[in-house]
């Protein structure tokens, strides 16, 4: 523990303090301005942290470790490894994009809305930085609670029902994970703190990685942890809360949930499940891969027949996350690194899609694809940018999703050929429903509703242009992210063996 404030601390504290400040800020513009400035400051810290990364080590030297509940063996321990830097980087990039794209939107109780958004960002940063199980659980809840209030207060007409379903799912998942954490904790060794205090057990990540559990214990613990993470991703059959919530949530919140929050589940599997319960992973990995691939094909088929564009994108996200989950459990270097690369890319691409959908819904008041048409005539700039983002979403070569998807399918092929073949069906279906959506919404003849649509304003144009730049840059040169996450992937596979 040093005498200076570290990068992971700044990534958490900046949005946390800014969120509390925004709560007490009056007016409509001031909360927006503070939230945007805060998110840009967090982005600056995230970029600066990349220059201090040590890719040869699993844990870098730039960590913060403070005694928290010493008699329980818990520390406030946050740090950044390669995967953590990538996911905090995704979070740091996403929030400015969201705030810029929705800057002209009006929300009732503006200060409360943006305050809760910043608290959610602080929670997400904490999840991706935590190296103590109790700290991880604390931030897991901190990220979810603001989103619950954001959905229930600012959502659509059916927000109460959808938010209740979201609450039940996430509450059950969190409770199962807490039971699993406590059980593993009770089987860890004693911990000695710097002041000489001896705790009977420890919540530290290192203690969890070295815990000795029988194969039988690991198997039922796997169920507890995996269900919690599967709900958050979500994957089949734990996905049923997602389309309703995405449809009813205010679009900025949907961007956070689909772009960043679903990565909490994938991150939890990589950081807390596989290294802690390797025997159970060996036992269940084929089942998880099969369920994930079923989810890919199922969600893609459902997306093909959706008329509601928000639900279409929601099912599209389920399919993409299912492919990532399957690739993780393929358990080889190329598949795991492909997942880490794709986590970043999926977040960027899905936020771009939601920006376009939000703009269309705000101007037309409709979400049904059958009621749209001809938008390319009225919004040519929007059409061009949307087509680029949509092509990235189906992993066209030279876009950011292509290298990650190629690596994941290659890893599945190395595990079993038919895994890759079945998953590829989902990739083909993704192209079908995405191109069909573009054709029906943007081409053809205008109607009385779409004839009134105007092209995008400066803030939406700026956000989408930045996303398009990232799409092409990572599509052409993904190596920096691959290099950043290499050590994390290698450690995961080493611990599994």
Image: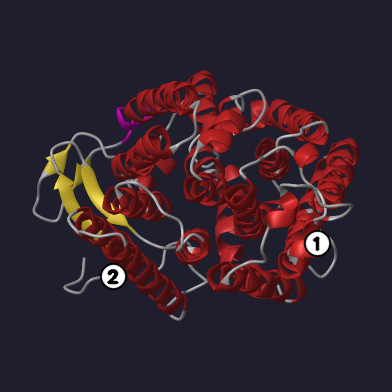
For disc 2, the marked residue is: 6
Question: Within the magenta stretch, is there residue 185?
Answer: yes
Query: Which is nearer the N-term, disc 1 or disc 2?
Result: 2
**Crowd tier of the residue under label 1, counting other residues whose Cα lies within 10 Å: few below 14, some 14–19, many 20 or above:** many
> Which disc is residue 460 wearing?
none
Image height of 403 relative to 130, above or below: below
Q: Secondary structure at mark 2?
A: loop
**Crowd tier of the residue under label 2, counting other residues whose Cα lies within 10 Å: few below 14, some 14–19, many 20 or above:** some
Q: Secondary structure at mark 1?
A: helix
Q: Which stretch appears magenta?
A: 184-188
Q: Quadrant of the N terminus?
A: bottom left
- Does the image show residue 279? no
Residue 200's x, y, as percent? 19, 34
Residue 314's x, y, as percent? 65, 39
Query: Which colour scheme appears in the figure?
Result: secondary structure
Among the 4 quarters of the image, the one containing residue 195? bottom left
Is 224 positioned to the left or the right of 447 in the image? left
> Badges 1 and 2: C-beta atoms under 8 Å apart?
no
- Does the image show residue 240? yes
Residue 86's x, y, as percent? 53, 63
Question: Within the magenta stretch, is there residue 476?
Answer: no
């Amino acid at each position: 523990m040093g005498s200076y404030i570290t990068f992971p601390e700044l990534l958490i504290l900046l949005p946390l303090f800014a969120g509390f400040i925004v709560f007490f800020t009056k007016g409509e513009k001031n909360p927006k301005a503070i939230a945007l400035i805060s998110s840009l400051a967090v982005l600056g810290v995230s970029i600066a942290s990349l220059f201090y990364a040590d890719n040869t080590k699993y844990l870098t030297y730039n960590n913060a470790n403070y005694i928290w509940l010493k008699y329980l063996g818990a520390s406030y321990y946050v740090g950044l490894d390669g995967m953590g830097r990538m996911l905090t980087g995704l979070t740091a990039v996403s929030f400015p994009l969201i705030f810029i794209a929705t800057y002209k939107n009006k929300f009732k109780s503006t200060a409360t809305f943006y305050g809760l958004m910043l608290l959610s960002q602080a929670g997400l940063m904490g999840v991706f930085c935590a190296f103590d199980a109790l700290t991880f659980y604390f931030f897991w809840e901190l990220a979810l609670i603001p989103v619950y209030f954001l959905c229930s207060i600012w959502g659509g007409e059916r927000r109460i029902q959808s938010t209740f379903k979201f609450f039940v799912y996430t509450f059950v998942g969190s409770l199962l994970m807490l039971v699993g954490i406590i059980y593993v904790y009770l089987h860890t060794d004693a911990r000695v703190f710097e002041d000489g205090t001896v705790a009977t057990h420890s919540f530290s990540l290192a203690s969890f990685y070295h815990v000795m559990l029988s194969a039988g214990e690991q198997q039922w613990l796997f169920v507890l942890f995996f269900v919690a993470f599967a709900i958050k991703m979500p994957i089949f059959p734990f996905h049923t809360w997602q389309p309703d919530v995405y449809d009813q949530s205010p679009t900025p919140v949907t961007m956070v949930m689909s772009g960043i929050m679903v990565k909490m589940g994938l991150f939890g599997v990589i950081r807390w499940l596989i290294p802690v319960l390797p025997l159970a992973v060996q036992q269940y990995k084929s089942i998880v891969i099969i369920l994930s691939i079923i989810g890919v094909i199922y969600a893609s088929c459902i997306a093909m027949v959706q008329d509601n564009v928000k639900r279409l994108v929601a099912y599209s996200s389920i399919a993409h996350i299912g492919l990532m989950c399957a690739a993780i459990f393929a358990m080889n270097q190329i598949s795991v690194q492909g997942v880490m690369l794709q986590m970043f890319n999926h977040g960027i691409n899905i936020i771009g899609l939601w920006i376009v959908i939000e703009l269309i819904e705000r101007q037309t008041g409709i979400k049904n694809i059958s009621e749209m048409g001809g938008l390319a005539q009225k919004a040519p700039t929007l059409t061009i940018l949307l087509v680029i983002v949509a092509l990235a979403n189906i992993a066209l070569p030279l876009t950011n999703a292509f290298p990650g998807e190629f690596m994941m399918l290659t890893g599945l092929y190395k595990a079993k050929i038919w895994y890759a073949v079945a998953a590829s069906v989902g990739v083909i279906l993704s192209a079908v429903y995405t191109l069909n959506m573009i054709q029906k919404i943007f081409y053809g003849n205008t109607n009385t509703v779409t004839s009134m649509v105007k092209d995008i304003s400066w803030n939406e144009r700026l956000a989408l242009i930045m996303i398009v730049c990232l799409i092409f840059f990572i599509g052409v040169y993904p190596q920096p992210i691959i290099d950043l996450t290499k050590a994390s992937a290698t450690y995961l596979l080493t611990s599994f063996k």
